[in-house]
Amino acid sequence: MRKAVVVIPTYNEAKNIGELVDKIFSEVKLSPAWQLELLIVDSYSPDGTGNEIRGLQKKYLHHIHLLETGREGLGKAYLTGFSYAVEKLNAYLILEMDADLQHDPKKINEFVHEIEKGADFVIGARYIKGGSIPANWGLYRKFLSVVGNLVVRFGFMKLKIADWTSGYRAIKTWVIKAILPSVKNYSGYVFQVAVLDNAIKNKAVIREVPLNFKDRTRGVSKINSFQYVSQTLFYVFTHSSFIKFVIVGFIGFFIDFGISFLLIEKIKTAVWLATLTSTESAIISNFLFNNFWSFKHKSIKTGRFSFILGFLKFNLVSAGSVLIQTLGLPLFSNLFGQQYWYIYKVLIIAFVIIPYSYFLYNKVIWKEK
């Protein structure tokens, strides 16, 4: 029998926890192949949440476990719960769930169904067909939620995943074991982004099911908007291969321009030779920075031949970028006027060359191992 453990962090949720637990055990209908247990991680809530849970333990006997910890943030509470579920409860599947009744317990049935179909990581997604956020949310909160998710999606260039910050998830234990060392230093709501990012890097199969997210009716939200935004942006900026790839592109541009200027203007080298030298210098720089920084987690390290082959492939992809500009810039100039050539160049680089290069680099040079 497989054990599914729902980890629920709590702080001052005495008014909600009883109703949530009753709903879970009355509305979740799993097959006999599954055993459902709850692990509630309470941060010594002063409102008596711990006492409420102890009362529920008497009602539901061995199906509810209580861990009491210091108040260290959402991420630390989940880490404590994950470790306990793995080491003490022998969980096959671990679910994340909020205690404030914003997550519909019936969705657990769908999560487990997706796991049975082969998923490793299932997300209750608000931003896919059938999902939603509360209509009465203020514009500011909607903006933070919607735009925040878009920033993460495009920052990591993982557009198939719609909801990166959802706190309602089901994750196989093997994924939890694989990612724990990488996410142990994250707390707050950025923890959700870090967990999903590392699950993807460990090749977990990700699925999403629609979630109609409800608004809290009792208690106070613990979300700190400034912390949420700043930590999420910092995580994406420091962990996104795509953003690093764009930064490397800018470095290559300045190397290309700087060497061209030096050779043509100062040394009076022939333009064709200066261009060839500056372009290849930028290509070498881009290849090295991308291999040892942007795509460090899948860099080419298997030997001299593989490294040279990767470099030659990189040159070929880069030649394609030059060809796109060579054909695209005159085409737009003929259609809309040469006086705006610099606008066409920026648009071609931003919307054609960058996606083209990033896609081919991932598929041809730095493939997933």
Image (tube, helix red, strand yellow):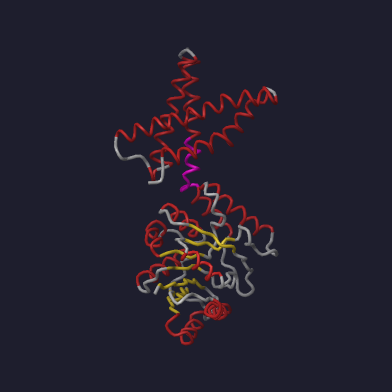
The residue at the far bottom in this view is: 58
First to last magenta residue range? 237-248
Camera-side residue: 268 or 296? Answer: 296
Query: In x, y percent, where is residue 251?
Result: 48, 33
Asked if residue 240 lies in the magenta stretch, the reply is yes
The residue at the far left in this view is: 303
Q: Residue at x 35, y 39 (%)?
A: 300
Decide if residue 84 is on the left or right side of residue 251.
left
Residue 37 in view (yes/no)? no
Q: Residue at x 49, y 75 (%)?
A: 30
Camera-side residue: 179 or 120? Answer: 120
Query: In x, y percent, where is residue 39?
Result: 45, 75
Screen quadrant of the N terminus? bottom left
The number of numbered discs placed on residues in the rendered structure image is 0
Camera-side residue: 98 or 36? Answer: 36
Query: In x, y percent, where is residue 99?
Result: 54, 73
Decide if residue 174 is on the left or right side of residue 352.
left
Camera-side residue: 63 or 120? Answer: 120
Residue 255 in view (yes/no)? yes
* Magenta-colored segment: predominant secondary structure: helix
Query: In x, y percent, where is residue 171?
Result: 45, 64
Q: Residue at x 33, y 35 (%)?
A: 306
Q: Is residue 218 above or below residue 305?
A: below
Asked if residue 92 lies in the magenta stretch, the reply is no
Quadrant of res 4: bottom left
Q: Is residue 151 above or below residue 14?
A: above
Q: Is residue 361 above or below residue 254?
A: below
